[in-house]
Image (spheres, rainbow, N blue to C red):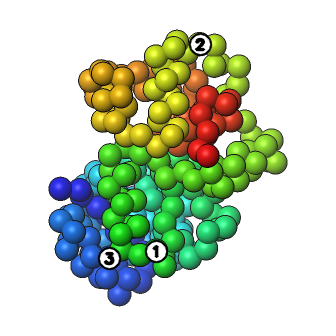
Amino acid sequence: MIRVLLVDDHALFRQGLRSLLESEGMRVIGEASNGREAIRYAADTHPDVILMDIQMPDLDGVKATQSILEINPQARVIMITMYRQDRYVFEAVKAGARGYILKDADAATLIDAITRVAAGEALLDPEMAQNVLDDFRDKREELPSEKHADLNERETMILKLLAQGFSNQDIALRLDISEKTVRNRLSEIFTKLQLNNRTQAALYAIREGIANLD
């Protein structure tokens, strides 16, 4: 059963999400109406997935996501936004959010997104990935470079599959190794490339031509 934390300042919207998710067999372990509550709930309950609204009073979703990921880099956050080109979504993804979902998405899309992120995937479509990479360049921020040679063939393949959206389980099946081995190899990859999370690893792989999302 996937455990979900809902974060949105509109109670009616949260109630609708709760009803939908619980009807699909998921468990809503908490609701937060602002970013500060989200940080506290995430630390206390360790949800499988956090659905995080962008615009909220007191502390917005981007800052809350950054704080949650500083505390727990493995946290799986999906941003909720009204607009595909929301500037704040880029900042959240750069910080390590697994992707985003539009508020007008249908139920099937939302359930699929939560299921995929709970399995370890990142929701990085080609447009989003390119926009975030462009943003790094425009702001003269950099992902680590000239580190690709440090990866061996198996690590490069794992990184490629991660960037293509495969979960740890799928990577393990494709490479005929255990999920524990995948987790250990990913930890080693992050250390070698000086990356903090799967989202940054996927962006790195796309930028370096290790993988593409076409």
Residue in the image at 52% along x and 30% along y: 160
Residue in the image at 69% along x and 49% along y: 130
Residue 163 in percent (x, y) is at: 52, 38
Say which quarter of the image contains residue 78: bottom left
Give the CA separation, mark 2 to mark 1. 41 Å
Q: Earlier in the sequence, mark 2 or mark 3?
A: 3
In-front residue for pair 43/105: 105
Say which quarter of the image contains residue 173: top left
Q: Residues within 10 Å of mark 1 (few under 14, many from 20)?
A: few
Give the CA separation, mark 3 to mark 1. 12 Å
Which residue type does callout 2 highlight?
Asp
What secondary structure is found at the residue carrying circle 1? loop
In-front residue for pair 80/109: 109
Work out which quarter of the rendered image holds the N terminus and state it: bottom left
Q: Earlier in the sequence, mark 3 or mark 1?
A: 3
Mark closer to the observer (3, 1): 1
Q: Is residue 86 left or right of residue 45?
A: right
Disc number for residue 37: none
Say which quarter of the image contains residue 89: bottom right
Q: Is residue 34 above or below residue 78?
A: below
Disc number for residue 17: 3
Look at the image and tell me whether residue 209 can be seen: yes
Q: Residues within 10 Å of mark 2 (few under 14, many from 20)?
A: few
Residue in the image at 46% along x and 16% along y: 154
Disc number for residue 105: 1
